[in-house]
Amino acid sequence: MNPFNVLEISPDASPEDIKAAYHRLAKRWHPDRFMGAEKAEAEARFRELAEAFSALKDPARRALLQQQLSKGQAAPAPEQELAQERTPEDWASMARTAFDDGKVDQARALIHYAIRLDGSRPQYHALLASILEQEGGDLRAVVKALETAVRLAPRDVESHIRLAQHFQTLGLAARAQGHLQLAREISPNHAKLRALDRKTKGVSAAPGSKQKGGAPEGPPSAVDQLKGLWGRLTGKG
């Protein structure tokens, strides 16, 4: 059964479109509107609509079906779907694939499901942060995901550096500096930290830089430099 065909919608339909299609068709095929042989047919159609809506209202199942259909695979029957045993890593792997393919909504739904099954994997939370960054949504949700990642993996240098940048953006310079310092203690030769150091030295050595009033201008803080570096690395600077 292809739930999208049952509900007469496209595979990229939004949750609102899915709900609207279900209510429209359920009203049309409600068994109380029919008599005799037609009533039996309506009952079968009504059950099929309910099964399709149940499959698609779950974000993770909907994302999986969308991913399968985009690859030209047949949608599994409900009993086959229930029989398939998928691990949290399977869901996370599908989330990474969807994210790499630019299907951010699918990726978010899939990684949320992986985290629901196993929230102890720091890489799942780091991937969630990347997905939320790509969406450009709530920065505090990104921070929460990264904080969970470093709580589970305290030596995750990448997540510390990302947290430093985001805390700087939020105006929390002390917390940004704290994560930057932790990153330096864990991996002082990390490529991003070396790039930051080179940039800092270059700015401090630049001749003739002045503040208002003619006083020499001091070098930007490490977190300010990190912000500029992050912008260049991510293409947002």
Image: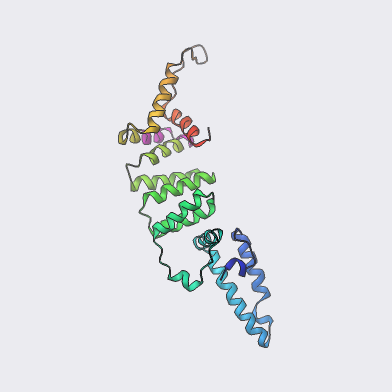
Q: Which residues are magenta?
A: 168-180
Rendered residue at 49%/37% (across/down): 234
Comparing 84 with 236, the one in front is 84
Q: Quadrant of residue 150?
A: top left
Q: Percent x, y for residue 218? A: 44, 18
Comparing 212 with 128, the one in front is 128
Rendered residue at 52%/63% (across/down): 58
15 to 155, vertically: above or below: below
Query: Can residue 171 be found in the magenta stretch?
Result: yes
Q: Percent x, y for residue 20? A: 64, 65
Q: Is residue 177 visible?
A: no
Q: Is residue 84 left or right of residue 2?
A: left
Dominant secondary structure of the residues highlighted in magenta in the image: helix
Q: Is residue 135 visible?
A: yes
Q: From the image, which quarter does the N terminus lie in?
A: bottom right
162 to 71, vertically: above or below: above
Rendered residue at 43%/39% (across/down): 162
152 to 68, vertically: above or below: above
* Residue at the far left in the pictured view: 185
Q: Percent x, y for residue 39? A: 65, 84
Rendered residue at 43%/46% (across/down): 144
Q: Percent x, y for residue 176? A: 41, 35
